[in-house]
Image (tube, rainbow, N blue to C red):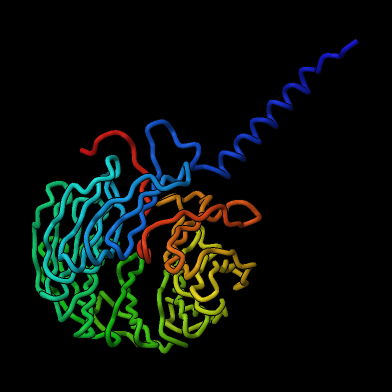
Amino acid sequence: MIRRPSKRVIFLSVILLFGALVLIAREHRPSFLLPGLHLNAYVSSTDGNVTVIDLVKLGAVARVAIGPGLSGMREHPTRSEVWGVSSQGGYIWILDARSNQIVARVPVGPLPYALDFSADGNRAYVTSSASDSLLAIDCKTRAIVARGRTGGEPVLARVTPDGKSILVVNHRDATLGVHDAATLQLRRTMPVVDRPDEVTVASDSTIAFVLSRSEPQLSVVDLRRSVLLTNLQLAGNPSQMLLKPDGGELYVISPGSHGLQVINTWTYEVGDYVLLGSAPTRGVLLPDASTLFVSDTAAGRITPLDIFNRRVSRPIEAGQSPVALRFESVGSEEKPSLLLVVNQASSDLSVIRVRSDSQTLLTMIPVGQVPGDLAIKLFSDARDR
């Protein structure tokens, strides 16, 4: 006689099955997108193309011809679009994520390098380094709505978190310009490290950090008083800096010194140094700031760093000369499932599982020659307003 399972056994089995499904869904979240949602990665390359990768199917679905000298690629914060810069062409290009087609090219002047968006996504800001100018673009109409004069050779424009100012890094002048976000009028200028390249701003918009990739120094600027507070000496020329979400620490990666330095953002002092590998270059923080993943271009791998304990975990194999890296969960507070890594020498994109205990390389997807920038866009079939 066959005994039927009791109601308690059936109930427990259902609970366990549901729990397993939830675990699988979390582990492989991109595969469980709601109907009408899409999650794509975009990789630019020196041949003037952008490769579009479906992150659910983990395969390339399109290759879009853009133009020469691609840089500064960014996903739009509210529209189903990816924006970027053609430095040689002197224009902003806009790619529609639904059709994978270029829908606009906006001339902005010679040698633009990067762009930034206002928090509401209504405006884009870009500099023309050869004409010493800052421009604001209406993201809906594609029209240039404001222009401003900058210092010598502006290479970067960044919107402050409060949305009131645009910070412009003037490479030739070695200055940081503060412009009004509405009119682009220059309010004030502060001296910074020689040949500056990058700026990041504290969440309360009071302090800015400016680095130069050709100088072993980091400038700290007080935006309220418009003064240079200090130039911090670094162990080597930096390649990137990342600000902890709570603002308490700044992490500076240096390939030449083979590691990372921690800057105390309250005292403006250089703190811990962590040895990471042969040539650590770029990094990305988990949303909870518990782990920093750093690409090592010389070793061809990704190094996880436990931020709290300053402890390096087992490296993860990637392709040849990994540089840019992003998580697949853009803007999400949830722990991501996948880490995407652009490999310049092997011309591919590594997809690494990071959610599980065993962080492993899942696949490598071929992209264009000498890939550079990486953007991630989650979008729906509904049309933008």
Above or below, comparing residue 325 to residue 312 in the picture: above
Above or below, comparing residue 19 to residue 119 in the picture: above
Look at 33% across and 71% down and name the residue there: 200
Q: In this view, does 279 lie to the left or right of 202?
A: right
Q: Is residue 321 left or right of residue 19?
A: left
x and y, in percent, of residue 212 in the image: 33, 82
x and y, in percent, of residue 169 in the image: 24, 76
Farthest top residue in view: 1
Look at 44% across and 70% down and name the residue there: 282
Look at 36% across and 59% down and name the residue there: 368
Which quadrant: the N terminus?
top right
Farthest right residue in view: 1
Whether residue 36 can be seen here = yes
Quadrant of residue 3 in the image? top right
x and y, in percent, of residue 201 in the image: 33, 69
Above or below, comparing residue 11 to residue 213 in the picture: above
Q: Is residue 114 left or right of residue 372?
A: left
Q: In this view, does 149 lie to the left or right of 94?
A: left
Quadrant of residue 224 in the image? bottom left
Quadrant of residue 194 in the image? bottom left
Which quadrant: the C terminus?
top left
